[in-house]
Amino acid sequence: MWSLLVLLQILLVKETAFGIKLTEVRVPKHTIKDHSVRLECHYEMEGEALYAVKWYKDGHEFYRYVPRDSPPVQIFPREGINVDVSSSSLSFV
């Protein structure tokens, strides 16, 4: 009985939920040491405002974009990662 109620609640929430929809994340499976790669996050706004985009490696945040912050981009130093915002490139060393 509980499982039926939970399923019904999930279905109701799914039908009425609005917000940003993540459509695709592109991350190369492999890279060569000291070569740049491009990480992509595609989403649909569905009338909402973007709060943040964050990238993690091994559970540690290394990049954050929050449009309302000043500056909107923050880079967190992580061993083996070099982020170049001006060229939108990322390299793993």
Image: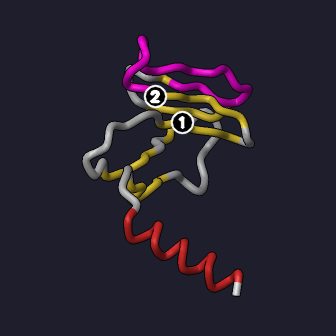
Question: With 31 as the anchor, is 20 left or right in this view?
Answer: left
The residue singled out by tag 2 in the image is 65
Q: Answer above or below: position of 6 versus 67.
A: below
Residue 66 spot, x, y in % from top left: 44, 26
Q: Magenta stretch mostly in which secondary structure?
A: loop
> Label 1 belongs to which residue?
54
| Quadrant of res 63 | top right
**The N terminus sits in image quarter:** bottom right
How many C-alpha atoms fall within 10 Å of the one at disc 2: few (<14), some, or many (≥20)? some
Task: Name which of mark 1 and mark 2 comes first in the sequence.
Answer: 1
Query: Going 56% across and 21% down the picture, which residue do you hit?
Result: 75
Is disc 1 placed on a helix, strand or loop? strand
Q: Which residue is located at x 46 percent, y 53 percent?
A: 26
Dots 1, 2 in contact, CB < 8 A: yes
Q: Is residue 26 a member of the stretch shown in magenta? A: no
Residue sitting at 33 percent across and 37 percent down?
A: 49
Q: Quadrant of the C terminus?
A: top right
79 vs 19, left or right, is: right
List x then y, in percent, for residue 74: 52, 19
On screen, residue 6 versus residue 90, left or right, reads: right
Task: Give the x, y percent position of residue 28.
Answer: 53, 53
73 in magenta: yes
Q: In the rendered structure, which amino acid carries the disc numbered 1? A: Lys
SS label for mark 2? strand
- Mark 2 belongs to which amino acid? Tyr
Q: Is residue 73 above or below residue 46?
A: above
Read off the magenta span. 66-83
Q: Residue furthest left?
A: 47
